[in-house]
Image (tube, grey):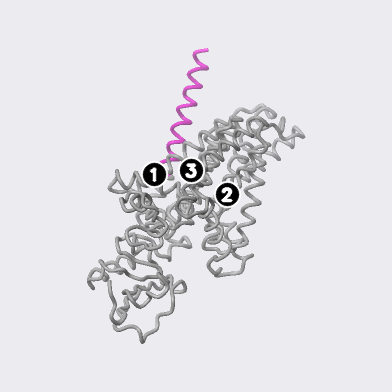
């Protein structure tokens, strides 16, 4: 008996060490990405939202009932109403407590992702060595972090929600509601909760509604409409999306490749185990139990909602919606790989099958992560403007040199300038202010800006990647 216990403890220790190695590798990849490229537009706007939550002006406006006007004015803080709020609320303490809030927050999210994958594995009664490497694949650490960050937070909460649903716990409704407050599109994952046992199902749905009520109340108080931010998000995604640089089918195929390429080896492992088991046993799984039913519900919902987002068809943003597919595919693949490994070891009476599968999964994760680490500069968004961009740094330097850093500035990349403490506004700020304030135009976003009429400009400063234009009789 003592020998069995020692073997079990050694197995648990090995499992813990390997899971921590997965975390370290994923964190190293993410930190290299951050320190070479910085964060991008959507993440920047969440960060600015978080800064607003640490500002006395925000709460003063809220108390006086003028917050909606202050948000539109943008004089003291910057908030985009269509952004789901949870990521910014979680980031705000890092701004107050850390000298390096963004990397600290990114590591926090990575650690939370690891915990959620381990909890998912325990809930499904599978090994974390199956679930954790899939949850922390390079696609997740690259595309769901510095570009926006809200997708990763929502994925984390959905994995927790799935784990609770697999345990038939009504608290799954709370986690789905929080996932939807991180990314509004995740609200669709209330649908799989209808497949929970009847009594638990009603409690879960009620808990989700109660969790969301404070945000409804906030919307109602500030904007006069309890679903204002939700409708704004729908408009932003489906009504006024940016033009797609390519055709919709090509964008969808390219995006699916980006999203699923890291998962393909795991799909092949599951398929190989299925064929290997079926060849001798003529059966795959002992039973299609509740775990598989709830996993299938999550998978179907994830595929359908992703198909809906393919309507947008922009290769610039569609890959990030892959978090929805991962929320459905990581649980079902974890279940299949583990259960088929166990089934194969029983059928062939070969205990080495299970550790061989774990080893293959770990090696695949390491190889994919190492490849991503080497190729970071080749990712499609690498040519866009990140906060570590030399072009952005030069623009901020020139704005300071011209003595207009304390002025209101019009720019087609206004969030980036606000990130560097310059009060920048979008080109149509107050509609008629285009030629009132100094203008900074970045070449990377030239299609997003209004054409500047030369007769209204007294001085033009041309630089590599951007221009600074000074309107006649400009003011700060």
Asked if 331 appears above or below 385 in the picture, the reply is above
Residue 105 makes an appearance in the image: yes
Numbered badge on residue 174 = none
Tag 1 near tag 2, CB within 8 Å: no
Label 1 crowding class (10 Å Cα cut-off): few <14, some 14-19, many 20+?
A: some
Instruction: Indicate whether 158 appears above or below 315.
Output: above
Location of residue 341 with respect to 181 vertically, above or below: above
> Horizontal and vertical percent for residue 220?
49, 50
Which label number is shown at residue 324? 2
Q: Total marks drawn?
A: 3
The first of marks 2 and 3 along the sequence is: 3
Q: Which residue is mark 3?
A: 214
Q: Secondary structure at mark 2?
A: helix
In space, the residues marked 1 and 3 are separated at their CA atoms by 28 Å
Q: Is residue 14 magenta?
A: yes
Q: Main secondary structure of the magenta part?
A: helix
Label 2, label 3: how far apart the Cα atoms are: 25 Å
Numbered range of the magenta stretch: 1-25
Residue 178 horizontal/vertical position (percent): 51, 42
């Amino acid at each position: 008996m003592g020998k069995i216990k020692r073997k079990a403890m050694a197995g648990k220790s090995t499992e813990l060490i390997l899971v921590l190695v997965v975390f370290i590798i994923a964190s190293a990849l993410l930190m290299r990405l951050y320190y070479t490229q910085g964060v991008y537009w959507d993440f920047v706007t969440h960060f600015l939202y978080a800064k607003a939550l640490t500002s006395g002006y925000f709460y003063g406006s809220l108390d006086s009932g003028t917050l909606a006007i202050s948000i539109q004015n943008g004089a003291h803080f910057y908030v985009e109403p269509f952004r789901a709020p949870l990521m910014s609320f979680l980031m705000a303490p890092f701004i107050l407590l850390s000298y390096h809030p963004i990397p600290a927050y990114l590591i926090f999210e990575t650690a939370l992702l690891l915990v959620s994958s381990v909890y998912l594995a325990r809930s499904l009664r599978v090994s974390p060595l199956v679930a954790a490497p899939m949850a922390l694949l390079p696609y997740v650490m690259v595309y769901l972090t510095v570009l926006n960050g809200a997708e990763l937070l929502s994925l984390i909460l959905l994995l927790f929600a799935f784990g609770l649903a697999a345990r038939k716990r009504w608290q799954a409704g709370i986690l789905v509601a929080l996932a939807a407050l991180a990314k509004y599109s995740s609200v669709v994952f209330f649908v799989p909760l209808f497949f929970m046992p009847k009594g638990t199902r009603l409690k879960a749905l009620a808990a989700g509604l109660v969790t969301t009520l404070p945000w409804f109340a906030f919307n109602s108080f500030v904007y006069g409409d309890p679903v204002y931010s939700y409708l704004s998000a729908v408009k932003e995604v489906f009504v006024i999306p940016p033009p797609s640089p390519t055709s919709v089918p090509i964008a969808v195929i390219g995006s699916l490749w980006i999203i699923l390429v890291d998962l393909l080896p795991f799909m092949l492992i599951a398929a190989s185990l299925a064929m290997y088991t079926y060849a001798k046993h003529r059966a795959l799984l002992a039973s299609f139990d509740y775990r598989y039913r709830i996993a299938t519900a999550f998978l179907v919902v994830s595929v359908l909602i992703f198909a809906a987002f393919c309507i947008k068809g922009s290769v610039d943003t569609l890959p990030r919606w892959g978090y929805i597919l991962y929320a459905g595919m990581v649980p079902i693949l974890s279940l299949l790989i583990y259960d088929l490994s166990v089934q194969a070891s029983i059928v062939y009476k070969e205990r080495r099958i299970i550790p061989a599968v774990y080893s293959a999964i770990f090696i695949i994760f390491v190889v994919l992560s190492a490849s991503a680490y080497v190729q970071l500069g080749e990712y499609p968004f690498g040519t866009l403007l990140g906060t570590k961009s030399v072009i952005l740094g030069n623009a901020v330097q020139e704005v300071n040199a011209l003595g207009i850093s304390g002025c209101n500035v019009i720019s087609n990349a206004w969030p980036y300038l606000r990130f560097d403490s310059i009060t920048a506004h979008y080109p149509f700020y107050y509609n008629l202010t285009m030629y009132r304030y100094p203008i900074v135009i970045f070449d990377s976003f030239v299609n997003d800006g209004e054409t500047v009429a030369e007769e209204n400009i007294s001085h033009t400063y041309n630089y590599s990647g951007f221009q600074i234009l000074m309107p006649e009789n400009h003011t700060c």
